[in-house]
Image (cartoon, rainbow, N blue to C red):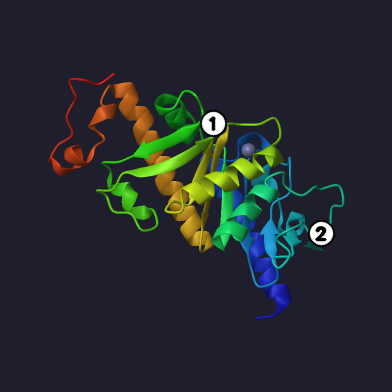
Amino acid sequence: MSADDRDSDLAELVCELCRQFYTLGWVSGTGGGISIRGTDGIYLAPSAVQKERIRPSDVFVLDADALDRCKVVRAPVDATLKISECQPLFWNAYRERDAGACLHSHSLWPVLAARIQVPSGRGVLRLSGFEMLKGLRGKSNLDEVRIPIIPNTAREAELTESMAVAMREHPDVDAVIVAGHGIYVWGRTWIEAKTQAECLDWLARAVVEGHRLGIVRCSSVRAVQSAMPRRCPDAE
Ligand code: ZN
């Protein structure tokens, strides 16, 4: 496989995943995005564009060996395109966790789940009692998973330091929720990042729907061990 083939494959993959994420409501309104580390560099969708319409020639390739800065290896054909605002946050995942991919979703589910459990916008989202927990690195369906929540800021890049701190405080999980905003998820490969993002979205939706149905407190280890879901008498 030539370098050009690798370029076109990963650039096309970024476009394909953006289209899929758009259908899930993860990158609507030009928000969100994804980056994937390849042999030639880190492939990154451009900023403030309709993510479901980007083409491989719109994708930036940045130097994966210069994670202390943002160094362009290959710029898009369209010179008006800008590097994603998510870039310094994605770099947290490459620097701190040696990730193979990192995505940012503006999905409603983690945003609402975090607001239900932690209205202050600073703390952890607790997830337990669901089979989908198995899709998270190193977790079983009997674990309680704690996803850190950090407060939002006016600019995406201003989240960089608080995200890095949250990552160091929660080394067992591969995600950080930004209150009222969205979620960052990464993995050793793009497949692991996508799988974990899908599982977390499902789990966050379970929190929201459970809250709506008044069964939120049933999401416990005890509940998952019972044969049938039940309504908790002490649900709030
Ligand atoms: Zn965002």
Q: Within 10 angstroms of label 1, few (less than 14), some, or many (20 or more) residues?
A: many
Q: Earlier in the sequence, mark 2 or mark 1?
A: 2
| Above or below, 152 relative to 48 | above
Amino acid type, residue under disc 1 in the picture:
Ala
Q: Position of residue 5 (x, y in %)?
A: 68, 74
**Which residue is situated farthest in the bottom direction here?**
1
Q: Secondary structure at mark 1?
A: loop
Q: Which residue sits at x=73%, y=42%?
A: 49
Quadrant in which the C terminus is drawn: top left
Direction from residue 76 to residue 121 in the image, left or right: left
Res 206 seen here: yes
Q: How packed is label 2: few (under 14 Cα within 10 Å), some, or many (20 or more)?
A: some
> Which mark is nearer the camera, 2 or 1?
1
Disc 2 and disc 1 in contact, CB within 8 angstroms: no
Q: Residue at x 63, y 55 (%)?
A: 35
Residue at image point 39% right, 57% down? 137
How many marks the image carries: the answer is 2
- Point out residue 224 in the picture as x, y percentages from the top left corner: 20, 42
Residue pointed to by mark 2: 75
Left/right of residue 78 with respect to residue 101 in the rendered view: right
Asked which quadrant contains residue 154, the reply is: top right
Amino acid under disc 2: Ala
Q: Which residue is mark 1?
A: 179
- Quarter of the figure that contains the N terminus: bottom right
Reply above or below: 124 against 216: below
Q: Is residue 13 visible?
A: no
**Is label 2 in a helix, a strand or a loop?**
loop
Q: For disc 1, does the CB lie below 8 Å from ligand 1? A: no
Q: Most extreme residue toward the left, as rendered?
A: 227
Q: Is residue 122 left or right of residue 71?
A: left
